[in-house]
Image (cartoon, helix red, strand yellow):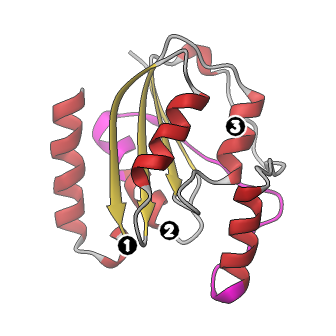
């Protein structure tokens, strides 16, 4: 059974969770890296991030997306912006056809919106089985051992 963790992370929270998941599941990992990154702080971060979600932008990625047909389980991780997944995930959706796979969604946020985000992801990957979802509030600011324990317990429940 082959597994991959695909994610985008602006400030490091989603990357932290992705790396924990990859380590615990012995999965390959792919960080979606847009050609042009939005600012990491201040008003511009919220303005450009929100605008890019509202207009469903699909930024060009610096790294290629592998053939996902070879994987049985695909984890997709995203920060939550405006109750949605981020534009690099839009790019992923537009570039690949994922069907009949086990999908797992994880998200990081500072103020909620996970249910709406996961619903949008489910709709975007409708021809698959979602076997689990989890969200984290600012995990990069939390105790790493506590977060790692949450990830391990969640993985044991869903896999």
Magenta region: 20-43
Q: Quadrant of the N terminus?
A: top left
In terms of secondary structure, where does tag 2 sit? loop
Tags 1 and 2 in contact by the CB under 8 Å rule? yes
Q: Position of residue 48 (x, y in %)?
A: 76, 72
- Identify residue for label 3: 92
**Inter-mark Cα distance, 3 to 1:** 25 Å
Residue 128 shows in the view: yes
Residue located at (56% from left, 29% from top): 123
Q: Residue 93 bears which disc, if any?
A: none
Q: Quadrant of the C terminus?
A: top left
User: Pointer 3: residues within 10 angstroms few (<14), some, or many (20+)?
Assistant: many
Mark 2 or mark 3, earlier in chain:
2
Q: Say which of marks 2 and 3 sits in front.
A: 3
**Inter-mark Cα distance, 1 to 2:** 7 Å
Mark 3 or mark 1, earlier in chain:
3
In the foreground, 63 or 115: 115
Q: Is residue 143 left or right of residue 58?
A: left
- Identify residue for label 1: 140
In terms of secondary structure, where does tag 3 sit? helix
Asked which quadrant contains residue 131, the reply is top left
In the foreground, 68 or 119: 119
- Identify residue for label 2: 12
73 up-or-down from 53: above or below: above
Tags 2 and 3 in contact by the CB under 8 Å rule? no
In terms of secondary structure, where does tag 1 sit? helix
């Amino acid at each position: 059974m082959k597994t991959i963790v695909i994610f985008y992370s602006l400030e490091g929270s989603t990357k932290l969770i992705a790396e924990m998941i990859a380590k615990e599941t012995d999965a390959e990992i792919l960080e979606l890296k847009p050609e042009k990154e939005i600012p990491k702080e201040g008003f511009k971060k919220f303005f450009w991030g929100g605008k890019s979600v509202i207009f469903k932008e699909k930024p060009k990625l610096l790294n290629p997306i592998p053939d996902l047909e070879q994987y049985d389980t695909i984890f997709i991780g995203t920060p939550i912006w405006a109750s949605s997944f981020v534009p690099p995930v839009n790019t992923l959706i537009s570039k690949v056809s994922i069907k009949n796979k086990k999908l797992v969604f994880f998200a990081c946020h500072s103020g909620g919106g996970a249910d709406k985000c996961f619903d949008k992801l489910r709709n975007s990957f409708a021809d698959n089985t979602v076997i689990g979802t989890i969200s984290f509030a600012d995990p990069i600011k939390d105790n790493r051992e506590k977060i790692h324990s949450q990830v391990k317990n969640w993985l044991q429940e869903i896999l």
